[in-house]
């Protein structure tokens, strides 16, 4: 038996099906080894040597992995085909003592029989350059996070964090908000002449020039002046320009364009899109076929498409739409500068698997996204759309008017896919409309003037889609980091949603200002983009990862020391009250904590006395829980036990405390039926189990599957680490967070229209 190690549990069944007999698949469910959470774990004096440990929540997984590997004749590492996947394979190889020069690594860009079987025939050694690029990113992010976060905690408030990519992304949001705040609207008046030809066809021509110079009316007085000068003037066609214009099909999706179109066309959030795309990549249940993967790998910045996929598309297009829709040569798209180009574009694995043929097997989010990906890829391989275009110039006295018309000649790719129009585009130029036949020198009949007062608008706030687009354009982050970066800004409460738009909170603005004050280089967008390029160079073998980290770290400690030693602070000073500390007699002070205000003794840490207060600073009296007498006799002293309320629920306690310290759990071994997703480890149903004075969620496949969770699992996967998600209630409301304690992913739950994918 050969053991094949993958990452996501969701694709276990799909991969197993294509491997055939003699293979067993083991899923690590993401990273199993990482830097420990509670220490820096990077030896800056020893060439930035990282100290890796098995993650706390993966110790059982690693134990099972080592056990499975010991029984296998061979181990193949088939983690995801990217830097993260390569690093996971590298860590697993170390755990299993797989020699560095042994070709144990296999990879596939899609989960299809052909791709999996081809990967088995072409194992390779682990790519150390890919691993080094991931190590450099991890070490850089750890250094920035662990060194900058204490500065924010000292200067603003406790429990804040900073990040190399997240903080620069936050800066984009904050600077856009300040553009909006400081924007001064300017008045303007779009002006049109409504005209008719001999056939009474109405034409809407926009004012363009005066004495052949561009003109823009900016007041009612200017409008009235133009109307007066046009009084009695003839409107004559001065020039007609006809042409056939072409519209090229859009490139197939990369990660960022998929996320943008999913929001703009389908209204799906980043997390919904990421979760749905992951499911389509890993595989969905198809009747009589089992799990079937529908799309290729979803984290890519390349528009490249394989020759086989192009040939299949050209054949399919010719058969379904006709040969006119097949371009003479296959369409090839240029990948933007700086892209890694490691994988193909996102496309359907097979065009024979149409969206309608699998609609009944998908939830609404999966179906909508698959249809979008399918149609975008199909359109990318089709012919151009062509239009009859006409541009007509009209003169009236000193003024020039213009009208542009466009009518479809051949639909081409638009028969399948229309690109998304920009939001808020004003139709101040008359637009592209159908026009009648006109000839040069023809006089048109004046009907009326149309005009209205308008004001220039400030730039729009970012949506998730436009923020990702800007991150991509500026080189901030890479495909795998877009979703977790935007998500963490919400979870840290640095940003919030206003409709579909992203708005920085006051805290987010303070964080940006503080970081720019002390660390302008790190907050420089170009610096962050250049660092991404250096990581790419490490991947290509052009740079040593420790040198890249060293160039960043040079002088960093000194800047930290300056920031920490500076007295400047945005923290609200402690307010002294007249409430005496009953332990030491000092006047207690009101402090601001992560969860609000509280009273504390100023003699901390010698005196640790604290008290809860309400919003007005009044001490909140904590009532002792009532005791109810039970019919249970304490077997130690013979007293009748009482029922008390603890953190985990009710329990029995002896009233003879402290002489008798006997307590008992209240037994209730029952199972409560509740709507739950399938087990994230094996796919079997989950159940809620009430046990003693608490409860937990467990797999019905026990003891074969030992999955448990103290929080209620929910649909979807964590966009940061791929683990399962859980529901969590806090004072601030209901949240969806990662089930893995080490992961920071947490986002406020939304209930409307979100029954399938967490939002």
Image (spheres, rainbow, N blue to C red):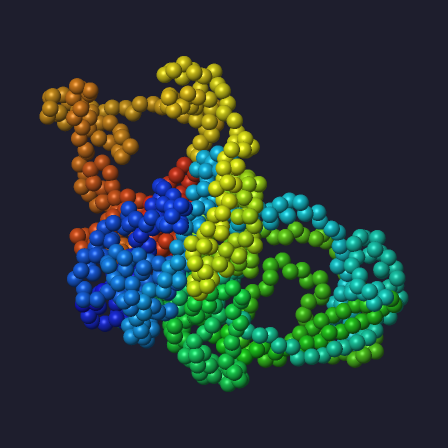
* Residue drawn at x 48%, y 42% as measured from the top left: 557
* Residue drawn at x 67%, y 52% as measured from the top left: 457
Q: Position of residue 245 (x, y in %)?
A: 65, 77
* Residue drawn at x 19%, y 34% as measured from the top left: 666
* Position of 635 relative to 173 (above/below): above
* Residue drawn at x 43%, y 26% as measured from the top left: 598
Task: Give the left or right position of residue 630, taking residue 391 as reference.
Answer: left
Q: Is residue 678 visible?
A: no
Task: Give the left or right position of residue 18, taking residue 327 as reference.
Answer: left
Task: Give the left or right position of residue 112, taking residue 469 as reference.
Answer: left
Quadrant of residue 17 in the image? bottom left
Q: Position of residue 548 (x, y in %)?
A: 46, 55
Quadrant containing the N terminus is: bottom left
Using the image as rendered, state which of residue 60 and residue 556 is in the foreground. Answer: 556
Q: Position of residue 583 (x, y in %)?
A: 36, 16
Quadrant of residue 420 in the image? bottom right
Q: Position of residue 222 (x, y in %)?
A: 83, 55
Task: Give the left or right position of residue 735, taking residue 104 as reference.
Answer: right
Using the image as rendered, state which of residue 207 and residue 477 is in the foreground. Answer: 477
């Amino acid at each position: 038996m050969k053991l094949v190690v993958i990452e996501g549990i969701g694709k276990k069944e799909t991969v197993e099906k294509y491997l055939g007999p003699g293979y067993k698949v083991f899923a690590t469910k993401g990273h199993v080894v990482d830097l420990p959470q509670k220490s820096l774990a990077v030896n800056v004096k020893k060439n930035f040597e990282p100290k890796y440990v098995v993650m706390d929540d993966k110790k059982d997984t690693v134990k099972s992995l080592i056990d499975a590997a010991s029984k296998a004749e061979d181990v193949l590492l088939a983690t995801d085909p990217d830097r993260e996947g390569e690093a996971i394979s590298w860590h697993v190889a170390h755990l299993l003592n797989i020699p560095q020069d042994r070709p144990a690594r296999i990879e596939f860009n899609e989960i299809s029989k052909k791709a999996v079987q081809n990967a088995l025939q072409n194992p390779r050694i682990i790519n150390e350059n890919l691993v080094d690029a991931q190590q450099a990113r991890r070490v850089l992010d750890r250094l920035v996070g662990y060194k900058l976060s204490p500065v924010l905690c000292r200067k603003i408030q406790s429990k804040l964090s900073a990040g190399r990519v997240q903080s620069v992304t936050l800066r984009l949001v904050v600077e856009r908000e300040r553009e909006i705040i400081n924007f001064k609207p300017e008045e303007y008046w779009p002006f049109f002449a409504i005209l008719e030809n001999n056939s009474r066809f109405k034409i809407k021509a926009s004012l363009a020039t005066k004495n052949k110079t561009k003109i823009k009316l900016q007041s009612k007085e200017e409008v009235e002046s133009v109307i007066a000068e046009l009084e009695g003037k003839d409107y004559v066609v001065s020039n007609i320009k006809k042409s056939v214009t072409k519209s090229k099909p859009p490139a197939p999706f990369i990660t960022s364009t998929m996320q943008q179109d999913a929001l703009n066309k389908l209204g799906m959030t980043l997390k919904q899109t990421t979760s749905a795309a992951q499911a389509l990549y890993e595989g969905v249940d198809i009747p009589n076929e089992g799990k079937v993967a529908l799309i290729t790998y979803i984290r890519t910045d390349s528009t490249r498409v394989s020759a086989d996929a192009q040939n299949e598309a050209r054949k399919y297009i010719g058969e379904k739409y006709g040969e006119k829709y097949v371009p003479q040569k296959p369409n090839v798209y240029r990948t933007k500068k700086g892209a890694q180009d490691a994988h193909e574009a996102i496309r359907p694995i097979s065009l024979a698997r149409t969206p309608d043929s699998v609609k009944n097997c998908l939830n609404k989010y999966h179906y909508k996204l698959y249809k979008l990906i399918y149609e975008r890829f199909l359109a990318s391989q089709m012919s151009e759309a062509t239009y009859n275009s006409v541009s007509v110039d009209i003169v009236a006295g000193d003024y020039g008017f213009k009208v542009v018309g466009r009518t479809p000649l051949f639909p081409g790719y638009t028969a399948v896919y229309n690109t998304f129009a920009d939001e808020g585009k004003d139709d101040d130029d008359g637009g592209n409309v159908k026009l009648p036949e006109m000839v040069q020198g023809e006089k048109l009949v004046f009907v009326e003037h149309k005009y209205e007062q308008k004001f220039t608008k400030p730039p729009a706030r970012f949506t998730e889609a436009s923020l990702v687009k800007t991150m991509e354009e500026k080189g901030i982050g890479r495909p795998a980091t877009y979703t977790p970066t935007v998500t963490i800004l919400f979870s840290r409460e640095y940003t919030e949603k206003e409709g579909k738009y992203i708005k920085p909170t006051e805290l987010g603005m303070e964080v940006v200002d503080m970081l720019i004050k002390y660390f302008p280089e790190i907050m420089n967008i170009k610096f962050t983009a250049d660092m991404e390029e250096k990581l790419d160079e490490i991947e290509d073998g052009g740079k040593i990862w420790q040198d890249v980290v060293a160039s960043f770290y040079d002088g960093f400690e000194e800047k930290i020391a300056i920031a920490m030693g500076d007295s400047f602070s945005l923290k609200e000073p402690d307010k002294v009250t007249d409430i005496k500390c009953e332990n030491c007699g000092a006047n207690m002070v009101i402090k601001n904590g992560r969860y609000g205000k509280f009273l504390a003794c100023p003699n901390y840490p010698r005196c640790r006395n604290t008290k809860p207060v309400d919003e007005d600073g009044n001490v909140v009296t904590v009532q002792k829980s009532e005791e109810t007498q039970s019919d249970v006799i304490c077997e130690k002293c013979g007293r009748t036990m009482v029922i008390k309320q603890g953190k985990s629920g009710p329990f029995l306690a002896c009233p003879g405390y402290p002489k008798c310290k006997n307590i008992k759990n209240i037994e209730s071994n029952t199972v409560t039926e509740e709507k739950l997703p399938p087990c994230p480890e094996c796919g079997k149903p989950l159940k809620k189990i009430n046990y003693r004075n608490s409860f937990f969620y467990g797999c019905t496949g026990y003891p074969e599957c030992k999955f448990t969770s103290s929080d209620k699992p929910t649909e979807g996967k964590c966009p940061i680490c791929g683990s399962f998600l859980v529901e969590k209630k806090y004072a601030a409301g209901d949240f969806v967070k990662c089930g893995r304690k080490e992961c920071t992913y947490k986002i406020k739950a939304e209930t409307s229209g979100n029954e399938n994918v967490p939002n």
